[in-house]
Each structure stands twice: as C-alpha cells, then as structure tokens.
Image (cartoon, helix red, strand yellow):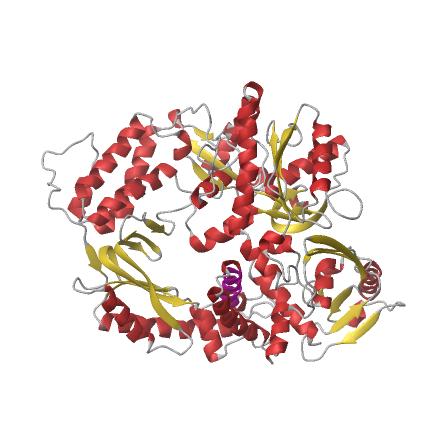
C-alpha cells in the first residue's frame, strides 16, 4: 500500500531534472530537463484526454477512444484522441446535436459534466511526471527583469530602462530613448542567458502586462519562450491583470513555452498569510524585513523615477540594479515552498506559485490518484444546505497578563482526521486521508533533514486538507458533514486542553484550534510550564501533539485572535490580528500602537500617555508624512456601479478617485487615499505600497487624524486600563482637567471574563 500511496503523492515516473513542460492541444509535448547542468529538450507525443459524465455529449469520430472507469463516480468516461482539438470538436458537435445548444469550449458544460485540464496538466497527470526531481532550487537558472517606465499607463507611457540580472548574478542595464531597441535587446539578453525561470516582484501585476502592451503597439513579437511562435500566451488566473470590459472582463496572466514566469509577490503573500510578520508586500519593505536590502540601497518614489533619471541617471541605475538584486534574493528566500510543491503536484511550476491550496494543489493530486487507479471521479455537487459548525474559539480574559505560555497544537484538524479516519464520503479510495498520512510522516523527515522548503510545502498541503473538506460545493470531494465532525472533535480536544491547563494552575487567556495562551503563576519556572503542558498532552488522542510553542514576558489580550506579545529579552513586540496590524489601517496609528503597547506591557502608564501626546504633537506640527495617514483599500465597484448610488451615499475611496481625475477604474484595483483640509478626500497617487512622494503635500486634516488616533487606535488599549486611568491617559492635551487623577500609581489590569 505504501508504494501506491507514494505514487499518489509524488507521481510514478522517476525522470529527473524536468524544469519546464509545454504541451499543445494537438498532442505535442515539449519537456526541458536539466541534467548535470546541461539543458536537454525532449519532444514527445501524448494523447489529450477529457473526463465526461455522459457519452451522449460525444460525437463518435475515428481515433477517439473511450474507457469506462471503475466505481460510482459521475465522471467515469475517460475519452482520448490523438488531437485534443478534434476531441473538443467532437464534444461540442455532440452537445449541439443532442441539445441544440452552441458552446465555444467544452468547459461550458460545467464541472458536473466534464473535467478538462490544460494540456500540460493532461500530460503530467497521464505520465506521472513532476517537475524538479533530483534538483535543488539553486540548480535552476533564474533571471530577473525589471522595467522602469515614464508612467503607469502602457497606453500613454513607455519603457526607458530595463534592468536584468542573469542566472550567474551579473546585472546589466538596457536604457535609451528608442523603446523598440530596448525591447529587442531584452529579447536578445533572455535568449543568451537562457533561463529556466524569469522572476520579478509584481512581474504579473506590472512588468509583463506593460511589456506586452508596449510590444503590441510597436509591432514586436516577444520571443521570450524556448519554442513555438514568438509572443506571450495567456492563462486564466484569480490574481492576474484584468482584460476586457464590463461583463466580458476576465483576469489573466502571461506565460511562454519553456520558461516559468514567477512573481515573488505570490510567495510574499503566501508567507505573510501564515507568518503575519511583513510590514507590507512591496519589494523594498520585504527585502528590508528579510535582511537582504543593501545598506546603501537607493530609494526613489515610483512616480518620480523618470524625472530623477532625467537629471541624475546614475541614481536611477543604482535603484534599478538594486531592484533586480533584491527580487532575486526575495524569490530565493520565500519561493522554496512552490518549488517543493512542483515535485509533488502535476501542474506547471508557475501555476503552483500562485495556486490556492484546495483547488490549485489538492485537487490535481486527487485527480491524478483516481486516474492512476482507473477510478471514476465524483463531480462537483452543490451544498445540501447543512451549515458549517464553527471551530472552538474562546476569550477567557482581557487586558495585560504576565509570564505567558503558549501551548501549541500542531495541525489539530489534520491530526483528528487521521486519528478518527474522517474523510470525504465520496473519496472511496481514501486518497485525501492517505495524502495527509504520508505528508505528516514525511514532514518529520523533511524537518529532520532541515529541508525547510519541503517542510513548508507539506505543511501547506496538510493544513489545507480540512479547508478542502469543508468547502461545500467548491471542491470535488467536499463533505460538510465530515468537516463538522472534525470541528466537533476539535472542540472536545480544545476543552480538554483548557480544562487541564486551568486545573494545573494556569490562568487561561485565549484558546483556538492553534493552541492556548495562558499566564503561569509567579513562582513557576520554565520547567514547571513544560511539565504542565506535558501532563495535559498525555491526556490527548495519540496523534494530537501539544507542546510548548513559546514563552513571553507579557501579553495584551484585546479580542479573540487580536493580541500583542512581549518576548523575553530585547526581541521586538509581536502583534497579531487586524486590530493591531491591517493593510487598511493608517500607518501612523499602527506606529503609535507599537510605541504605546511596549510601555503598557511593562507597566509604565505615564510613558503610554507621553507617546499619545507626542503623536498628537507630531500630527499638529505636520511631522507625520502624508503617506502614513493614507488608507489602502480595494475598490469593489465599477465606475458605473458607484455613480448609480453616489447621490444617496458617497464613499471616500471613490470620491478620491474622482477628485484625482480618475473616472475609469476596475473592481479589484487597490488605491491609497487620505482626508485633506477643507473636507477634501484625495488620492495618494503613488504606484506601490512603499513609494512616498518626493514632494509631500502634508495637507491632511489634522483634527480628523487626531480624533482617529483617540477614538480608534487608543481604544484598542482600553481593556488594559481601569476606566478612569484610560480617560486620564487619553484626555485631550489641549483641554487639561484640574481634577485629572495622577498616573503615578496606575497599573494595567487583567479582567477574567465570566
């Protein structure tokens, strides 16, 4: 059984060194392998295939074969042909003959009737091959490219400089007034370097769309691939650029044969979703946080790069060179999980880099396993209306506590699925549970071997198994009843942990499925803390692991999953939850919270007041950058949708767009805006999260932001102070009270909730 399950997880073809796969609908497949540092291209034939629920949709044609798969699944007819286009035409004609309905693509039949994968995935599923067998991440030849443009509109602006970093680390700049020459020089440089991977930060969000549009306008065929006709292809992507208009809009990413186009923004988002420790997702902030930014790194606001180039080109050259250098380091540090996933999952590497864990990772593994065993697959089915029961989440106390212990539960839900064999009812082969079993066991081996990337990839898949189970109607094997049984068991385990810790003398603060935070008695040593956790761990089901996840000097408990931790020693504060860290929040407020929480946890209430008064003073003297009072939001309405309701309800983000002369935008676009003097709402027109304007207007509404500081950010500390102390600390400094209480003896409080 173990060999079969290994094939479900890893595939069964041991061919080493695959760095890229490209397949055409006509059954041609091109495979590039790197063996001993040398690149090999192999041209193969495969038989394109579809899975159908009903053969009545198929027009019989010569060369088309049908295999009926075993078992009760709806998608049971494996249909193959030498040419995928002929196969698709046979289905389209069959639908028209049977129903009179005209369809342009077989996917229009819906998930219940057909499974149609891209050609590369058809090839990988059918052959059992995967990327990167016997390769390390550094065996890939990776090239970074970054565009500098006169503006953000590819229709109106142009490229004036392209920075490249070749696979050996050499940085070159292509610059000049002849944009067509620059693009041709880039094409030539890519051909000479022959990278397996082309990378940049926001590659798919800016560089490739801009480059594609400029090349189109100049009549240049972008020959960036290794095979086929010059030009970029497109693929659907949830996180791509929007093309088309109104109801015909769709999101796409660009792709080319033979090279993988990797955007390190995807790895950044994936990392921050788990760690929640990045100040933003922009390249400069991430590189600085990861310690790969140069000490003399040049900084230029994105909106002013071209104007700076005109008067000081050497400065922009340094700036652009640093961009590709940092992009290379960020991609290497954060991209290992996607690289490791490509060793398992039958998808192109570039697709796994931005794939969601359920439909993007687990679904291909399950499809491959069922077809390998010649078993029929279930179709997507709608939810039966059963509600998803919630996980255990408890807030036991609010305020400030000391001597904090985190009792960590490792992968609780997957462990319960494994212990009690809770899997999807329609997964008759038991593939999902087998994958969880194999991954949990093999992750221990990866951790022991210090293979951080593989361990992270396995953790990602393991932790997505429960979400896959509970995604009613969205995943092929979803089972809300099984998911509810997992959460029921999880609540039982969490109750057992909490009861056990409290019985041993700890004061409970917060608990959820990731673990429990509690305050240890003043007399306890670290050995006492570990002993209490070990004793409770012994009470749990065998495969549920409870361990000491961390020790902290103090904790501010605000709301469930919203807290601040002060580590022992000089390590920085840890802030968790949108109350303390949010991409939408104004940065001056988050900066205030970080400065105020540290003395609060140390019991220095007068210092908290001093930080508050100092922040108000900085606002009133306009020492706070305008960037730090902006709010970052995602637009959810099209111009037409907003204008239809504008008279009855005006919304600040859209008013900022209109005031900035922007009467066109698309849903999903992210912007920054702020409240300015005289009641204005203004757009902060900077092209990325980290760019500050060289000429800062500082025309923000001081009184508005002072109120925001007091009424929004300061209130997140309210549970840590007695009401009279809170009122005294955050009183208006311009309206002192004759009877204000002294803060000399004020202390933070902890309130145990009933």
Residue furthest top as drawn: 311
Q: Is residue 644 visible?
A: no
Q: Residue at x 72, y 50 (%)?
A: 258
In the rendered image, which quarter contains the N terminus?
bottom right
Residue furthest right as drawn: 62
Choose between 503 and 727: the one closer to the eye.
503
> Horizontal and vertical percent for residue 701?
36, 28
Task: Please determine whether, in this image, residue 40 is positioned above or below residue 128.
Answer: above
Q: Is residue 657 visible?
A: yes
Q: Residue at x 63, y 44 (%)?
A: 167
Q: Is residue 36 left or right of residue 403?
A: right
> Horizontal and vertical percent for residue 313?
57, 23
Q: Is residue 280 left or right of residue 43?
A: left
- Read off the magenta span: 454-466
Asked if the stretch drawn in magenta spans residue 456, the answer is yes
Asked if the stretch drawn in magenta spans residue 274, the answer is no
Q: How many marks?
A: 0
Q: Quadrant of residue 219?
A: top right
Q: Residue at x 45, y 74 (%)?
A: 416
> Horizontal and vertical percent for residue 105?
76, 57
Q: Quadrant of residue 362?
A: bottom right
> Horizontal and vertical percent for residue 93?
84, 62
In the rendered image, which quarter contains the C terminus?
bottom left
Q: Is residue 418 left or right of residue 241?
A: left
Task: Please determine whether, in this image, residue 508 is positioned above or below residue 285.
Answer: below
Name the main secondary structure of what is drawn in magenta. Answer: helix
Q: Residue at x 73, y 41 (%)?
A: 191
Choose between 108 and 650: the one closer to the eye.
108
Choose between 744 and 1: the one closer to the eye.
1
């Amino acid at each position: 059984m173990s060999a079969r399950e290994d094939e479900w997880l890893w595939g069964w073809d041991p061919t080493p060194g695959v760095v890229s796969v490209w397949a055409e609908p006509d059954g041609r497949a091109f495979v590039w392998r790197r063996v001993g540092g040398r690149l090999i291209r192999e041209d193969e034939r495969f038989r394109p295939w579809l899975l159908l629920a009903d053969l009545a949709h198929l027009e019989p044609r010569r060369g088309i074969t049908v295999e009926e798969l075993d078992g009760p699944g709806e998608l049971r007819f494996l249909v193959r042909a030498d040419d995928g286009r002929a196969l698709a035409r046979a289905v389209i004609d069959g639908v028209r003959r049977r129903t009179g309905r005209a369809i342009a693509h077989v996917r229009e039949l819906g998930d219940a009737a057909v499974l149609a994968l891209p050609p590369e995935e058809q090839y990988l599923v059918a052959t059992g091959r995967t990327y990167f067998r016997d390769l390390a991440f550094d065996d890939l030849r990776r090239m970074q490219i970054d565009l500098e443009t006169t503006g953000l509109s590819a229709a109106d602006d142009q490229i004036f400089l392209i920075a490249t970093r070749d696979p050996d680390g050499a940085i070159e700049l292509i610059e000049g007034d002849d944009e067509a020459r620059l693009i041709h020089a880039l094409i030539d440089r890519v051909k000479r370097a022959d990278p397996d991977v082309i990378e940049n930060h926001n590659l798919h969000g800016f560089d490739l769309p801009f480059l594609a549009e400029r090349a189109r306008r100049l009549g240049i065929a972008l020959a960036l691939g290794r095979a086929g006709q010059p030009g970029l292809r497109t693929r659907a992507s949830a996180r791509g650029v929007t093309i088309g208009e109104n109801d015909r809009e769709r999101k796409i990413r660009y792709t080319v044969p033979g090279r993988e186009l990797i955007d390190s923004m995807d790895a950044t988002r994936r990392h921050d979703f788990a760690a929640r420790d990045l100040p933003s997702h922009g390249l400069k902030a991430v590189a600085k946080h990861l310690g790969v930014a140069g000490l003399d790194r040049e900084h230029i606001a994105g909106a002013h790069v071209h104007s700076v180039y005109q008067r000081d080109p050497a400065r922009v050259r340094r700036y652009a060179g640093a961009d590709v250098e940092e992009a290379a380091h960020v991609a290497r540090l954060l991209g290992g999980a996607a690289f490791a996933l490509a060793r398992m999952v039958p998808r192109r590497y570039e697709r796994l880099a931005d794939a969601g864990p359920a439909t993007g990772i687990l679904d291909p593994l399950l499809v491959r396993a069922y077809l390998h065993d010649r078993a029929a697959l279930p179709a997507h089915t709608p939810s039966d209306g059963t509600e998803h029961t919630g996980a255990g989440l408890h807030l036991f106390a609010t305020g400030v506590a000391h001597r904090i212990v985190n009792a960590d539960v490792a992968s609780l839900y997957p462990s319960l699925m494994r212990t009690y064999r809770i899997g999807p009812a329609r997964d008759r082969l038991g593939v999902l549970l087998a994958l969880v079993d194999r991954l949990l066991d093999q992750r221990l081996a990866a951790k022991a071997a210090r293979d951080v990337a593989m361990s992270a990839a396995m953790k990602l898949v393991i932790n997505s198994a429960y979400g896959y189970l509970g995604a009613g109607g969205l995943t092929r094997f979803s089972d809300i009843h099984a998911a509810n049984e997992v959460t029921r068991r999880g609540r039982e385990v969490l109750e057992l942990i909490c009861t056990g810790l409290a019985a041993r003398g700890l004061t409970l603060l917060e608990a959820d499925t990731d673990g429990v935070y509690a305050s240890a008695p003043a007399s306890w040593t670290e050995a006492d803390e570990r002993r209490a956790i070990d004793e409770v761990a012994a009470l749990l089901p065998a495969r549920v692991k409870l361990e000491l996840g961390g020790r902290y000097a103090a904790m501010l408990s605000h709301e469930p999953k919203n807290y601040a931790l002060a580590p022992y020693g000089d390590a920085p504060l840890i802030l968790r939850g949108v109350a303390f860290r949010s991409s939408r929040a104004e940065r001056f407020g988050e900066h205030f919270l970080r400065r105020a929480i540290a003395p609060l946890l140390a019991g220095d209430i007068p210092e908290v007041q001093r930080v508050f008064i100092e922040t108000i003073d900085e606002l009133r003297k306009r020492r706070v950058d305008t960037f730090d009072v902006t709010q970052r939001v995602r637009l959810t309405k099209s111009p037409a949708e907003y204008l239809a309701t504008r008279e009855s309800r005006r919304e600040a983000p859209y008013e900022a767009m209109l005031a900035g002369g922007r009467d066109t935008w698309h849903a999903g676009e992210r912007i920054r805006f702020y409240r300015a003097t005289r009641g204005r709402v203004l757009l902060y027109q900077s092209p990325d999260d980290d760019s500050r304007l060289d000429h800062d207007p500082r025309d923000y509404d001081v009184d508005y932001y002072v109120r925001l500081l007091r009424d929004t950010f300061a209130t997140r500390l309210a549970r840590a102070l007695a009401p009279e102390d809170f009122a005294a600390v955050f009183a208006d400094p311009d309206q002192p009270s004759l009877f204000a209480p002294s803060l000399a003896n004020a202390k933070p409080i902890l309130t145990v909730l009933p």
